[in-house]
Amino acid sequence: MTTRLNPYLGFKDNAREAMNFYQSVFGGELALSTFGEFQASEDASEQEKIMHGMLTSESGLVLMGADTPNGMSYTPGDNYSVSLSGEDDAELRGYWEKLSDGGTVTVPLEKAPWGDTFGMCTDKFGVAWLVNIAGAQQ
């Protein structure tokens, strides 16, 4: 898989509804994972919320989205980030180093519960980035 750059939308308690809507618009395959599936939250009210959603259209469009956890701020209009994902560890770590330099690391780039290496940062211009390096494929 080549490295991909995708929009990542944040929602407040309605990511499932929103991502299903976008699927009705663009078609394609929708994959949704909850916070509960990955034991990513101890808050009982978050277990069924969407931790990660990814819509891939037949024409190759990719849109990602998730519910904002209760402990994080949510401001409509600022509820987006840019996702970099792929398998090239060196390439993606290089992007991570450059994007986080002078910015703020919100989630360190490290092994995630789903088996990939994942991190979140905000660059020095205020743009939020997610970097996901695919783990060893089965």
Image (tube, rainbow, N blue to C red):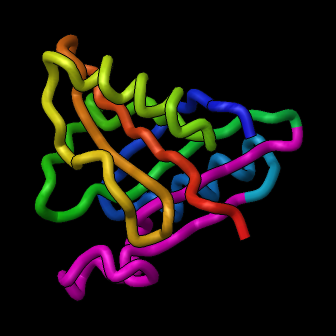
Quadrant location of residue 136?
bottom right
Residue 70 left/right relative to 30: left
From this viewpoint, which residue is outermost toward the bottom?
44
Who is closer to the viewer here, 114 or 87?
87
Quadrant location of residue 99?
top left
Quadrant location of residue 126?
top left
From this viewpoint, which residue is outermost toward the front?
90
Give percent across and percent down for residue 77.
29, 29
Answer above or below: position of 2 versus 119. above
Residue 95 left/right relative to 21: left
Q: The N terminus is located in which quarter?
A: top right
Residue at 42% x, 24% y: name it.
Answer: 94
Give percent across and percent down for residue 115.
49, 67
Who is closer to the viewer here, 52 or 101?
101
Residue at 73% x, 43% y: name it.
Answer: 25
Who is closer to the viewer here, 23 or 72?
72
Residue at 32% x, 54% y: name it.
Answer: 110
From this viewpoint, which residue is outermost toward the top?
125
Who is closer to the viewer here, 37 or 109?
109
Residue at 76% x, 41% y: name it.
Answer: 26
Q: How many marks?
A: 0
Residue 70 left/right relative to 113: left
Q: In the image, which residues are magenta?
A: 30-58
Give percent across and percent down for residue 122.
22, 28
Q: Is 72 inside the magenta-drawn segment?
A: no
Answer above or below: position of 125 versus 80. above
Q: The C terminus is located in which quarter?
A: bottom right
Give percent across and percent down for residue 119.
33, 45
